[in-house]
Image (cartoon, rainbow, N blue to C red):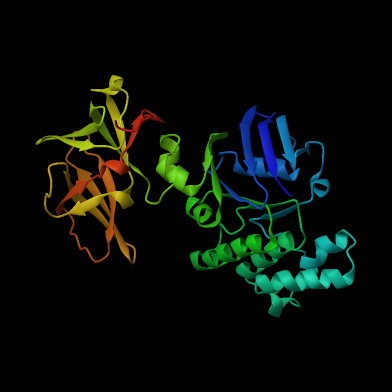
């Protein structure tokens, strides 16, 4: 059992009085793969280093299986670490690099050999066990680093941007192998990255940090469909969520003003009547916008194509709306649908995909009567 709890954890660096982590409370359950995402400087790596015992906690408490570990060093916590830098021992071959943490614990040679060969097979390292790190490409070196982290049964496996500097093809392959290792070994894994697409492909749950604070934690589906605030809505998803100025018409509809008049869109649920006539922000994900060359219904808004990005099976259109703010909106269409620069297309938003924000905060809705 390897549950991890952070209770009201702070990290303040005395020099400059920098708050790196602020009042962080979250749980990583036994055998869960938890990804921590956020921009640079958001508090991700400081959180991971406190979990590992490499940084002292300013305030709060970290528990492994209900027992406080604040006073324990990395070895006593029994955590496995892998970072962006490989940190391999250049004088040891691949086999001995992987075996090092096992030998340091006094494990017998027979068991060491079994464990090393098992994890090497999972990471496709069997053919290079006798080679030295200096002769390996970056992708292979990182696999060795990951093998060393996963080879023993730690309480928690901590991974800090382990593949962020690699090219896309190698990253995709290593992502799959990391998830396979996690599942087959039954580990509890906490993975830090600034790449939300990478985190989404790996995790059971996602924790979003920004400006040292936890913004939201939940499954990808929960965060995608019910973002806690505008920052989370923008950060999770590629392309990012669109934000458009609008006004509340009724407790069940919102409008966007264009030169020809206003366009009214219904949304799912019902909000407090106090918002009627208030200016708000409408959030719509690019993947959920319906685009057509003709105006099929009154509840649609014209946009002029400004940028076309072909991405294989899909095309991302950047369009300028005819609203008063000249808002730019991104929409995703199938690659088979061809559009031209400056062409006008009509955008429709179905009621169930419209998000409403009052400044940074979502406007709460109740089910319609």
Q: Is residue 11 above or below residue 241?
A: above
Residue 58 visible to the viewer? no
Residue 285 appears in the picture as rendered = yes
Q: Is residue 229 left or right of residue 25?
A: left
Question: Residue at position x 88%, y 64% from top?
Answer: 107
Give the residue at the far bottom of this rendering.
Answer: 127
Which residue is depicted at the point 76% across and 66% down?
Answer: 98
- Of residues 320 and 221, the one nearer the viewer is 221
What percent of the width, then of the height, locates residue 59? 71, 28
Farthest-out residue, left: 260
- Tell whether 364 sits left or right of 344: right
- The residue drawn where x is 51% and y is 46% is 219
Front residue of 177/98: it is 177
Q: Nearer the viewer, residue 339 or 352?
A: 352
Vertical relation: 346 (above or below) 119: above
Residue 56 at x, y percent in the picture = 75, 36
Marks counted in the figure total: 0
Percent from the top left, x then y, of residue 129?
74, 76
Which residue is at 78% across, 69% downward? 115
User: Which quadrant, please, contains the C terminus?
Assistant: top left
Residue extending farthest front: 369
Left or right: where 27 falls relative to 89? left
Q: Position of residue 12 (x, y in %)?
A: 67, 30
Q: Which quadrant of the structure image shows residue 332?
A: bottom left
Q: Is residue 81 above or below residue 144?
A: above
């Amino acid at each position: 059992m390897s549950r991890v709890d952070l209770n009201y954890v702070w990290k303040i660096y005395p020099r400059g009085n920098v708050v790196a982590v602020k009042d962080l409370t979250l749980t990583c359950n036994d055998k869960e793969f938890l990804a921590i995402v956020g921009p640079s400087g958001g508090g991700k790596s400081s959180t991971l280093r406190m979990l590992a015992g490499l940084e002292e906690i300013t305030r709060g408490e970290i528990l492994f299986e209900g027992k406080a570990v604040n006073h324990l060093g990395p070895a006593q916590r029994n955590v496995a670490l892998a970072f962006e830098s490989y940190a391999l021992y250049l004088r040891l071959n691949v086999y001995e690099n992987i075996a090092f943490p096992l030998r340091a614990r006094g494990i017998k040679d027979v068991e060491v050999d079994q464990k090393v060969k098992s994890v090497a097979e999972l990471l496709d390292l069997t053919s290079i066990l006798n080679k030295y790190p200096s002769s390996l490409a970056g992708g292979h070196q990182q696999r060795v680093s990951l093998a060393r982290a996963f080879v023993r049964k730690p309480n928690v496996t901590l991974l800090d941007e382990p593949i962020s500097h690699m090219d896309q093809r190698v990253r995709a392959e290593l992502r799959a192998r990391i998830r396979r290792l996690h599942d087959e070994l039954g580990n509890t894994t906490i993975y830090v990255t600034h790449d939300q697409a990478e985190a989404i492909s790996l995790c059971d749950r996602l924790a979003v940090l920004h400006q040292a604070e936890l913004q939201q934690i939940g499954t990808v589906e929960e965060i995608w469909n019910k973002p806690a605030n505008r920052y989370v809505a923008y950060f999770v998803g590629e392309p990012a969520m669109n934000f458009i100025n609008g006004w509340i018409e009724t407790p069940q509809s919102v409008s966007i003003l264009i030169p020809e008049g206003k366009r009214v869109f219904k949304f799912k649920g019902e909000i407090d009547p106090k918002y009627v006539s208030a200016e708000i922000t409408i959030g719509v994900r690019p993947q959920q916008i319906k685009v057509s060359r003709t105006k099929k219904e009154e509840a649609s808004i014209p946009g002029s194509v400004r940028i076309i990005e072909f991405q294989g099976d899909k095309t991302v259109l950047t369009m300028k709306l005819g609203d008063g703010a000249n808002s730019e909106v991104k929409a995703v269409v199938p690659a088979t649908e061809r559009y031209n620069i400056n062409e006008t297309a009509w955008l429709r938003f179905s009621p169930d995909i419209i998000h409403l924000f009052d400044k940074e905060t979502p406007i709460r809705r109740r089910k319609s009567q």
